[in-house]
Amino acid sequence: MLGNEILNEIYEVLKQIDHKQIDELIHTIMKDTKTRIFVTGCGRTGYIMRSFAMRLNHLGLTTYFVGDTVTAEAGQGDILIIGSGSGETDSLICYSKKAKELGMKCILFSTRKSNTLAEMADITVVLQSGSKYELLNREDSIQPMGALFEQSLMILLDSIVLEIMRAYQISNETMFSRHANLE
């Protein structure tokens, strides 16, 4: 069944992640719960990053998705978290440059350690899954374009949320109490 092949691909990506980077990322996010967090990504990765921003809000952290009309001003000490398989998306490079000018910490989730965004990032978490561009002429994944990166990223981000919940003893009930209720 193809579903099992997809799960195996995701497992292979996740088992290669440097957990020291994840610990550093969690420490950076939780060091000061008054720090504002700005999250961004484009395309399908953007949707996954938007989901992560929602969960960070459920954790009680002040989080915005860059570009939304209600996004606050960013400044010194705030955090920008970017998801970009290639690390070469022009709009995300502009955000990262501006964030560095403002004195923000930059965290990147990408498919490789060597790209334009990684050069600017304080922390780069690599998901060795290939970007949509790298997979055009490779057979490392049965999935189209950047699907393996996107799926692995979603699971990794959800596991980061779970680690924060456990470390800071945040219950499901507390998370749910922060969930949108105008539905």
Image (cartoon, rainbow, N blue to C red):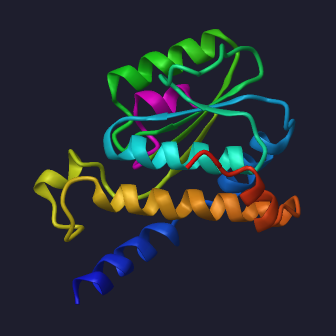
Determine whether 106 is above or below 27 in the image: above
**Residue at screen point 67% across, 55% down:** 22
> Which residue occupies the extreme bottom position in the image?
1
Residue 44 image position (x, y, % from top left): 33, 46
Q: Residue at x 79, y 65 (%)?
A: 173
- Check the image and name the residue furthest to the front: 182
Q: Nearer the viewer, residue 86 or 44?
A: 44
Magenta-highlighted residues: 111-121
The x, y position of residue 115, in whole percent, is 40, 34
Quarter of the figure with residue 9: bottom left
* Residue 176 percent location from the top left of the image: 72, 59
Report the quarter where the N terminus lies: bottom left
Q: Is residue 44 left or right of residue 173?
A: left
Q: x and y percent of residue 103 in the render?
A: 70, 15
Q: Is residue 114 magenta?
A: yes
Residue situated furthest top in the rendering? 101
Query: Is residue 144 magenta-colored?
Result: no
Residue under the image location 22 percent in, 83 percent down: 2
